[in-house]
Image: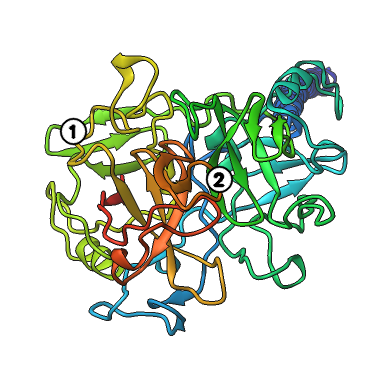
Amino acid sequence: MVISKLWAVIIAIVLVVSALFSYYYINQDDDVNDNDIDDDISDDDDDDDIGDDDQLELAHVFTVPDTGQLTYYDNDSEMLATQIGDDFHGQDALYSGYQMSYIDNGDGTITDKVTGLIWQKAPMENKLTWSEAKDQASDLDFAGHTDWRLPSIKELYSLIDFTGMTRMDAASSVPYINTQYFDFEYGDTSTERFIDAQYWSSTKYVGTTMNDDPTAFGVNFADGRIKGYPCESVVGPDGPFTKTAFVRYVRGNVDYGQNQFIDNGDDTISDNATGLMWMEMDSAQAMNWEDALDYAENLVYGGHDDWRLPNAKELQSIVDYTRAPDSLDVSMQGPAIDPIFQTTETESFFWSSTTHLDGPTSNYAVYLAFGQAAGWMQQPPNSGNYVLLNVHGAGAQRSDPKSGDPTEYPYGHGPQGDEIRIFNYVRCVRDI
């Protein structure tokens, strides 16, 4: 009897323990399954973000890509990399910046990983007038998207690559755009110059150029410049004509090119859109390129000593294309820069640290025209009577000899007689 009761107790204990273990493992399985479901949902969300071509981890909403220039130059030739204290120290090649980086999406589009912009790999088949370029953007259905737009001048200039060089013909030249990713062709020499590879932007000049011509900005990826071009019919030496140019549409990051300036109250201005800090004032004196580099490298200003001469793309990022000395809107007349900055001279050019390889030597460096980009033109044509005109507009990017005497260029340089100054102003930059 005692034994029977003992076995009954043992069996009861075993049943209770078994029930407890079953309850525990069932609930553990439920917990594990819940976690698995949560993990699966999280993974799916992550995949959606990664797969969306509009979603990129950008350093800044208006990240300025580097120029690509890696070679050091003195006033007229290549040189070895510089050290602190050397002549020409502080030029573009010294500072790496955000290196240009692209993805070929395999559908005729290229994603810029630095800017978040998505581009057509190939330009439109034919050159277009500015009016046609604007109109066709709204009708474009390409690579599964219909939100294409004609790029602003700041968007378009983000593609420029200053490893390019211009020589005497296309065969000996290198385009100012990465041809590993972007299709490019020079001008058709049967009807135009080989350097006629201008691309339209959507940015219209707020003044006029040449003979009061309505003007829009473009980038020439054959010779590495921003210029204003007539955007309506004009009368040329051979009669009326309407300018045509290449067109490459863009989509994504609609905030690119929009500055977010903050006055720091210490004579510096921060741009939270680009992550760059600028001198509120300029150098107050114009100087040649070597002196501009030296000025920037030795500057102590606003409590900082890590200033540099900006590269071409950094400097172009602060151009205000809603302003110009000759703006048709009188309230917007002045240098092409936000009035949060102070500028010594309205009609001013500013040096960049970037060498412009236009010609047989490296004796030119890039500047941005914050005043009117003037040139000496014969009026009437071939008359020998030279007149200084606003040929390319405030906000143009051209280049000057790095050294020399500007009086040796009484009628400028190039087909539009670009005014040569050599002594230009400086506005230094640093990373925030």
Visible residue check, residue 20: no
Local crowd size for mark 1, using a 10 Å CA cut-off: few (<14), some (14–19), many (≥20): few
Residue marked by disc 2: 381
Looking at the image, tell me whether mark 2 or mark 1 is earlier in sequence order.
Answer: 1
The label shown at residue 312 is none
Residue 166: image location, x then y, percent:
62, 65
Residue marked by disc 1: 264
Q: Describe the element under mark 2 as helix, strand or loop.
A: loop
Visible residue check, residue 323: yes
Between 154 and 173, the one lying in front of the other is: 173
Q: Residue at image x 81%, y 19%?
A: 15
Residue 34: image location, x then y, percent:
73, 21
Residue 79: image location, x then y, percent:
44, 83
**What amino acid is found at the position of numbered circle 2 in the picture?**
Pro
Left or right of 205 in this view: 102: right
Left or right of 61 in this view: 132: right
Q: Is residue 273 above or below residue 187?
A: above
Q: CA distance from mark 2 to mark 1?
A: 50 Å
Q: Residue furthest bottom?
A: 80
